[in-house]
Amino acid sequence: MRHTGLMMSIVAAATMAMAADYEITPLGGYVVKEGNLNLDNERLFGAELQYNGVDSAIKPELSVLYTPDVDYDPLTTTTGGLIPTTTTVVNSTSITRFALNGVYEYPVWAQVVPFAKAGLGYESIENRFFDNENGIFLDVGAGIKVPLTEAIALKAEALYMLKDPFDHADSNFAALVGISFGFGGGSASTTECVTDSDEDGICNDKDACPETPMEAQVDEKGCPLDGDKDGVIDMNDACPNTPAGYQVDETGCEEMMELELTYEFDSAVIDASSAPKVHAFGRFLMEHPTYTIHVVGHADERGDELYNLRLSEARAASVRNMLIEQGVAASRITTEGRGELEPKADNSTDEGRQANRRIEVRINR
């Protein structure tokens, strides 16, 4: 059994950005500052607002980050006179940063939603010392969202900010964490979308195969993929390229096939309409050199039983000879005739008798 509750939360996180027009994230964090700024590392808090109602993979985000009080390195001054006086002053400042970013969210991976972002911002320093000035900065970042409910996710990110790249090239590195709330837009459709009983990524109301096995790849209808159409889905198919019409075992590998060859009454000659089928089978054998085959000929019930047995043997031999001419090693092919003993159709009709004049091939891997 799959953990349905967990998967529903994961799908909710993946669809939150699509269903909710807005995501707002109150957050806090810590900034490690470049040494030449003469400022202590700082704690900050703020918020990010992401808008998802655009027809684009890149979503706009507005962020505001605020530090109310961060200290500069101490300033020491000395005054002259008979007794020089040394004074040490510690100044502090508040810092406010505004940024506009583009955010790209990746598909759900390992139960989280990874994202990357980049943009442009403005840093405002209230008290400016040591050549620190207000200015524009570039930022790049990455992070994850971890689903908690349909519209709430834990958000963590790392952000690099570079101010005045052509002069001081001042840089800051921030680690941020917060709670993201989705609101507005299609909350009802989100509820529908997370109803996915077999957890294949296709909502129940659109899933034509609601009991897909775990980890099976599915098509747009939610049905497991079966590339060679042999009745064994790809995830269980040990032989994924079986030609159409072959009978396979539970692993999807060839077990027995019937070559639908046409034989005239009392004839072992493969006619022109049937030869291409033998040639196609020969190509299959050349592509699978470890396979050996056992060719079984059959006949209808008209005529003597012993004669029909010999006729069915001749039909099997005709297939073997054609395959050998095509390049298949003779050692890989054995033959047998079953005569009229194993009819597959009613011998009282022309159609039934034609069906009984057939070749079956058993394949050994």
Image (tube, grey):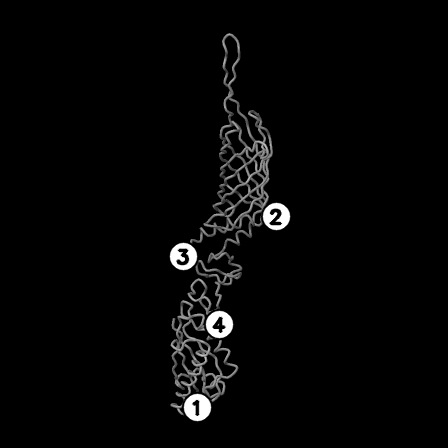
Residue that mark 4 sits on: 244
Residue at x 42%, y 87% (from the top left corner) = 311
Residue that mark 3 sits on: 1
Which quadrant of the figure contains the N terminus? bottom left
Q: Amino acid at mark 1?
A: Arg
Q: How far across and how far down the image is residue 303, in percent? A: 42, 92
Mark 4 vs mark 1: give the one in front.
Answer: 4
In space, the residues marked 2 and 4 are separated at their CA atoms by 46 Å
In space, the residues marked 4 and 1 are separated at their CA atoms by 32 Å
Q: Amino acid at mark 2?
A: Val
Q: Earlier in the sequence, mark 4 or mark 1?
A: 4
Residue that mark 1 sits on: 302
Q: Are marks 4 and 1 in contact (CB under 8 Å)?
A: no
> To which quarter of the image does residue 285 belong?
bottom left
Mark 3 vs mark 2: give the one in front.
Answer: 2
Q: Amino acid at mark 4?
A: Ala
- Graded by Cα atoms within 10 Å as few (under 14), some (14 to 19) or many (20 or more), the crowding at tag 4 reads few
Q: Amino acid at mark 3?
A: Met
Residue that mark 2 sits on: 54
In space, the residues marked 1 and 2 are separated at their CA atoms by 76 Å
Q: Earlier in the sequence, mark 1 or mark 2?
A: 2
Q: Are marks 3 and 1 in contact (CB under 8 Å)?
A: no
Q: How far across and how far down the image is residue 355, in percent? A: 47, 83
In space, the residues marked 3 and 1 are separated at their CA atoms by 57 Å
* Residue, far bottom: 304
